[in-house]
Image (cartoon, rainbow, N blue to C red):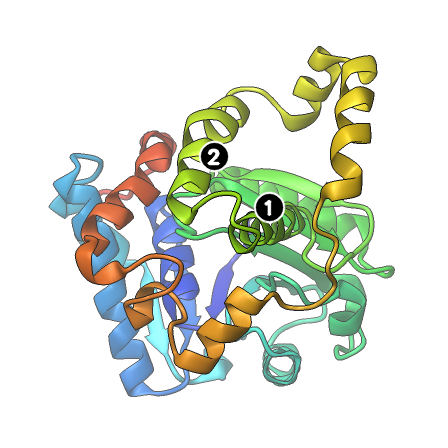
Amino acid sequence: MSERIGVYGAGTIGSCEITLITGNSFPVTVIGFDDADLERCRGKLETNWNDLISLGLATEENKKAAMKLVNLTADPTALKDCTFVFEEVLEDIKIKSSVFKIIEENTGDDTIIASSTSSIDAEDLAATVKRPERLIVAHPFQPVHLQPLVELVCNAKTSDDTVSRAKDLLAQLQRVVVCMKKSVPGFLVNRFAQTLFREAIYLIEQGVTTAEDVDIAVKYAVGMRYAEIGLLEYFDAVGFELESAIAKNCYPDLCDTKELQETVLEGLRTGKTGMTAGQGLFDWSNRSYDDYRRRLNAPYLDGVKKWHLPKGE
């Protein structure tokens, strides 16, 4: 079936999802919280398209045609004809459950709700809706319109039809999908990330290395390697014998804390909480955010060439 798409949430994730949807020539109904929220969303859409135009990946014609495909409103009754709604609100189960209720009240029984949650258990979300068989987690990664991966996570009652329709739509949006058989905290990618974050901060706290050298090690070994071959492909290539020997040496010394680490706690106490605060593990006052954003986006830009860009009349 041809899905009629809605997006509930007009923030950063929502605006990038909208860019992706319209960038593949789908119309979309967008629900924001108020006029100011919608105006911010419109500005973010403009920025996303201007970035693509500056890189030669889209034209002003594409941008104008895409913006015409967007229906921005604070009135949830506009969702009445939508068959697939992406939920893109804050990572708070109370907020999400209230949004689910609004979506269910304003759409048909067959409408799929795809939650963007990055860590809330799919079963906990399912407990808040009338039709859990039509609820699925579709967790994207920022920048959502550029990074291709989406984690699909089912709850125990998610129907096969819901999974099939979600996969089909995401394929039309040029996404790469991994599907989890059951929900675990953090799903796949965030679990991998938390493992690396914890170990990196531990090594810094132990005086073994620095934040700068951790990033160099990741960028020029781990990152380059796994951009081309899979983690477990590499495990098989190295072989169980050598990996077993390495594991016996490393496992006893790996960080296994279940608590937040002192570096993080100190940052929270002092307000040195990362990039937006100007100081975290790095001093961001001497770093260019534009350069960071350029490097963040660079690996994914070729994917835009696969979009079915809208054209003017």
Q: In the orientation shown, which residue stands out farthest toward the right?
A: 156
Taking 43 as reference, is 148 left or right? right
Between residue 106 and residue 203, name the one nearer to us: 203
- Left or right: 53 with respect to 267? left
Q: Which mark is residue 196?
A: 1
Q: Residue furthest front?
A: 207
Q: Is residue 114 above or below residue 57?
A: below
Asked whether residue 312 is in view, the answer is: no
Q: Residue at x 62, y 24 (%)?
A: 230
* Location of residue 14 (image quadrant): bottom left
Q: Give the distance between the C-alpha atoms of the residues marked 1 and 2, in whole angstroms.
A: 10 Å
* In the image, residue 227 above or below residue 49: above
Residues packed near mark 2 inside 10 Å, few (<14), some (14 to 19) or many (20 plus): few
- Residue 43 position, x and y percent, is 21, 68
**Where residue 266 appears, x then y in whole percent?**
49, 74
Circles 1 and 2, Cβ within 8 Å, touching? The answer is yes
Q: Amino acid at mark 1?
A: Leu
Disc 1 packing (10 Å; few <14; some 14–19; many ≥20):
few
Closest to the observer: 127 or 240? 240
- Residue 38, percent from left and from top: 31, 78
For residue 218, the mark is: 2
What amino acid type is highlighted by mark number 2? Val
Query: Which residue is painted at 43% across and 62% down in the image?
Result: 13
Kindly tell me whether residue 44 is visible in this rendering. Answer: yes
Q: Is residue 59 above or below residue 223?
A: below
